[in-house]
Image (spheres, grey):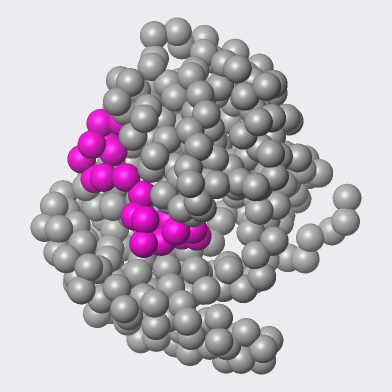
Amino acid sequence: MIEKMNIYVVIPSWNGKELLKPCLDSVMAQGQSAEIIMVDNGSSDGSQAFVKASYPGVELIELDKNYGFTGGVNVGINAALKKGAEFVVLFNNDAVAEPDWLEQLSKTAQDNRSVGIVASKILRTDKQHLDSTGENYSIWGLPFPRGRNEVDNGQYDKLIEVFAASGGASIYRAKMLGEIGLFDEDFFAYFEDVDIAFRAQLAGWKVLYEPTAVVYHHVNATSSKLGDFSLYHSSKNFMLLYAKNMPLALYIKYLPLFALQLIRWSITSLLRGKIIAFLRGVFAALGLHFSTVKKRRDIQRSRKVPIKYIDRMLYHHRPPRPPKLEKP
C-alpha cells in the first residue's frame, strides 16, 4: 500500500440511490487509503439522506440541480484540491471496484512522473465483456473506448500509453490539473474525458492504461433514463472536441474525414428518427463558437509537444463497429 499519497476519490451521482451501496462499499474496502467525496447533482430520490445515514465517513456535497458530469466532478475536484490532494480519482456511481483497484492505479501514477492520467481496466458487470481499456481518438474526430464489448481474454493486459482515460474510473495528477484546468463544463457529459486528456497530451502529459486496476461498470445506468440526452450532448461535444484541440495542421488534414463523419451521423440520426436531437447538439456547438475559439487559442498556444507526436497518438482508421454484446 502507498500510504503517503494524498488521494481523494470523487463520485458524482444523480438519482442513483439504488447504485450507491455497492459502489461506496467497494471504494471503502480499498487497500489504499483515500478520502471520499460524493457530489450529488440535485437528486430527488433520497440519495443524500441515504449517504448521510449509511456512510458518515463520506463527505457529501449537495448541489441544487444537475450540473452534469463535468459540473459535478469539478465541484468535487476543487474541494479535493483545496484540501491538498496530490491525486484525484473519478469513479462512477454505477461502478464497483476490485479491492486492489486504487492501489494499482495510484502506484502507476506515482511511479511515472510524466504521467498525468491513468486509466483503469473497465469491464461490464458480467465480468466477461470489456467496457473500456482506455479511450482512442480517431482521425475522423470520433472518440471510442478500446475493446468495448469484446470478451476479455487478456488481449488488453499490457501497461501502455493510450490517448485518453474513461472518466468513470481514472486518476488525475493535481499538478497536471493546475496546468491545464479542470473539465470543460460546456461538455456537460460525454467526451469530456477525451477532451481533458487531449489537453493533457498537448501540454506534454502522458496517459497510461493500467490493466491490473479493475472495475465493473453498469453501462448507461444513468443516461439511459434521459431519452435523447446522449445524442444531443454527443453531437455537440463531437464538434467542440475537434474545434478546441486539434492542432491547425491536423485540423486541416483531417477536416474532410471529420465532415464525412458528421454527414454520416446526421443520416443515421435521420433514419432513426433522432435528427432533431442531433441538430440541436450541432447548433448548440455553433452557439458556443466564440468561447470555443478563445479556449482553442489558449490551448494551442500552450502546446509543448510536436504535431507529429499528436498525429502518432491518433487512431488512423475508422472507429470499429463494436460486436454485438452476448447475453451473459
Residue 48: image quadrant is top right
* Rendered residue at 39%/15% (across/down): 5
Residue 210 appears in the figure? no
Above or below: residue 232 compared with residue 144: below
Judge from the rendering whether residue 183 lies leftward or rightward of residue 261; answer left or right: left
> Where is residue 225 drawn, in percent x and y?
69, 61
> Where is residue 82 drawn, in percent x and y?
29, 25
* Rendered residue at 32%/45% (across/down): 182
* Rendered residue at 68%/22% (across/down): 53
* Rendered residue at 54%/70% (across/down): 319
Give the mark count: 0
Residue 101 colored in magenta in the image: no
User: Extreme right residue here?
Assistant: 328
Residue 190 appears in the figure? yes
> Where is residue 198 drawn, in percent x and y?
33, 54
User: Extreme left residue here?
Assistant: 301
Judge from the rendering whether residue 287 lies leftward or rightward of residue 319; answer left or right: left
Above or below: residue 287 compared with residue 101: below
Name the foreground residue: 318 vs 178.
178
Name the foreground residue: 152 vs 144.
144
Above or below: residue 133 compared with residue 295: above
Judge from the rendering whether residue 180 lies leftward or rightward of residue 118; answer left or right: left
> Where is residue 214 drawn, in percent x and y?
63, 33
Residue 215: image quadrant is top right
Q: Which residues are magenta?
A: 174-193
Name the foreground residue: 45 vs 262.
45
